[in-house]
Image (tube, rainbow, N blue to C red):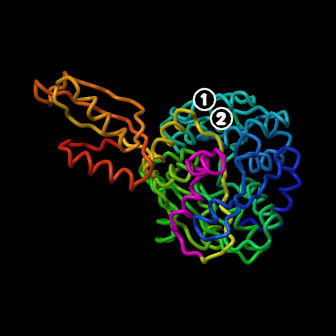
């Protein structure tokens, strides 16, 4: 099991490649939660993720023969970029296996850092199987995304920074995918402070809590979450041991809650993170764990590499959760002025119309009717309730699409 000395030594190795990231108080989220929220802005790291820390530490420790043979890794995107850049900076050849449905932005970025990219499988675990085949075939060193002491120690340098930047910290909240990040951070935080460490997983990729419950690593059959950076079917064997000893609690958040945190960060803090980077703040906002008024909490925003198509979907979902966007269907009489009457009602309730789809040909409606689907900008849940109530009172049968 890694210790503080491993993390401290890693800091010297990664210093030239990874930068120290800021830690800033958020008035917005402090006021919203009643806690003293300090955001660790690790999404501002080189390559947009903490993964550069662990990858650099691991590759720096390679022997000359291992450097000559090159490295191979599997990743959904962030570890891929970290390994690619760390390898290129040290003159080591790298091959990265990524899931076939990895975000295009992460695939392109990995190639731009100098790696050879191979797409294989539907998730990280399938990509890892292929990466191990390449390891055996080409005698490369496998750089694990999380289940490696050198990688964990590298990620733990974030914990050193938090302890120095915020010595009064009470709680550190850390995303969990495979567990390398939280294992490293918890090692530093528990040695240097009296703070507790809370782990957070996406509900659709949660294996840590169940593993802790039964006392051994449990593998899920599949994962399904917008937080692709932490979408692993199981945590690591080595990281599990550290988590058992040094992490106080593991909680989960849903995709809508992640989307809400992400859009809140973007709108109020002008901070863009990916789904995996938002889960720690989501757990605080949704009070997935107990905390006191005024408690100093540091959520780690661990990644900012979000695909633009995913961002569009996530923002829409986040707006829906906050009552800021509403998509509805209704049926109108197919006569002049029917649509105008509906638009006037919406205008009366200060509802902005983003889009209207008017369909007379739907087989599910009467011959003298037209189906209308509207995308509406609303002003919160109370406004949505008032609007739907008025529509119903005036005789419209409304189906909420989203």
Q: Quadrant of the C terminus?
A: top left
**Is residue 383 one of those drawn in magenta?**
no
Q: Which residue in the protein does label 2 denote?
A: 96
Residue at image coords 74%, 65%: 2
Point out the tag, 2 or 1, that comes first from the N-terminus. 2
Magenta stretch bounds: 263-291
Residue at image coords 77%, 54%: 154
Q: Residue furthest left?
A: 367
Q: Which of the 4 quarters of the picture holds residue 110?
A: top right
**Can you give x and y, in whole percent of width and height, for residue 60 in the image?**
84, 46
Left/right placement of residue 268 relative to residue 3 reads left
* Circle 1: element type: strand
* Circle 2: element type: strand
**Is residue 283 one of those drawn in magenta?**
yes
Query: Is the residue 67 above or below the residue 151 in the image?
Result: above
- Foreground residue among 51 and 148: 51
**Can you give x and y, in whole percent of width and height, for residue 11 in the image?**
85, 56
Q: Which residue in the protein does label 1 denote?
A: 118
Left/right placement of residue 382 relative to residue 44 reads left
- Foreground residue among 339 and 142: 339
């Amino acid at each position: 099991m890694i210790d503080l000395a491993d993390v401290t030594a890693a800091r010297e190795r990664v210093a030239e490649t990874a930068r120290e990231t800021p830690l800033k108080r958020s008035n917005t989220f402090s006021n919203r939660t009643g806690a003293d929220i300090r955001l660790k802005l690790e999404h501002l790291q080189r390559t947009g993720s903490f993964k550069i820390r662990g990858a650099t530490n691991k590759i720096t420790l390679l022997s000359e023969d291992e450097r000559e043979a090159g490295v191979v890794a599997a990743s959904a995107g962030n570890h891929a970029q970290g390994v690619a850049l760390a390898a290129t900076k040290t003159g080591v050849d790298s091959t990265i296996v990524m899931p076939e449905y990895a975000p295009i932005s992460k695939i392109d970025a990995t190639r731009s850092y100098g790696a050879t990219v191979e797409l294989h499988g539907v998730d990280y675990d399938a990509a890892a199987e292929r990466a191990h085949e390449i390891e055996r075939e080409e005698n490369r060193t496998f750089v694990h995304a999380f289940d490696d002491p050198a990688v964990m120690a590298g990620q733990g340098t974030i914990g050193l920074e938090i302890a120095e930047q915020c010595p009064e910290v009470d709680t550190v909240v850390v995303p969990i995918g495979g567990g390398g990040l939280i294992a490293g951070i918890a090692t530093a935080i528990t040695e240097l402070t009296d703070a507790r460490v809370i782990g957070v997983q996406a509900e659709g990729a949660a294996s840590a809590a169940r593993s802790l419950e039964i006392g051994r690593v449990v593998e899920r059959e599949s994962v399904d979450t917008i937080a692709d950076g932490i979408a692993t079917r199981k945590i690591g064997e080595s990281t599990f041991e550290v988590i058992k000893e040094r992490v106080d609690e593991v909680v989960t958040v849903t995709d809508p809650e992640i989307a809400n945190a992400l859009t809140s960060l973007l709108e109020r803090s002008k901070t863009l993170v990916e789904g995996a980077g938002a889960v720690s703040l989501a757990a605080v906002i949704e009070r997935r764990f107990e905390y006191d008024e005024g408690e100093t909490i540091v959520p780690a925003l661990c990644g900012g590499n979000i695909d633009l198509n995913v961002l569009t979907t996530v923002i829409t979902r986040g707006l829906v959760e906050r009552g800021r966007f509403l998509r509805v269907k209704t049926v109108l009489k197919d006569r002049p002025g029917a649509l105008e009457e509906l638009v006037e009602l919406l205008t009366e309730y200060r509802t902005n119309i983003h889009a209207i789809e008017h369909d007379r040909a739907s087989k599910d409606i009467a011959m003298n009717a037209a189906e209308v689907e509207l995308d509406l900008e609303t002003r919160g849940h109370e406004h949505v309730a008032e609007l739907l109530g008025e529509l119903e009172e005036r005789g419209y049968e409304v189906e909420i699409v989203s």
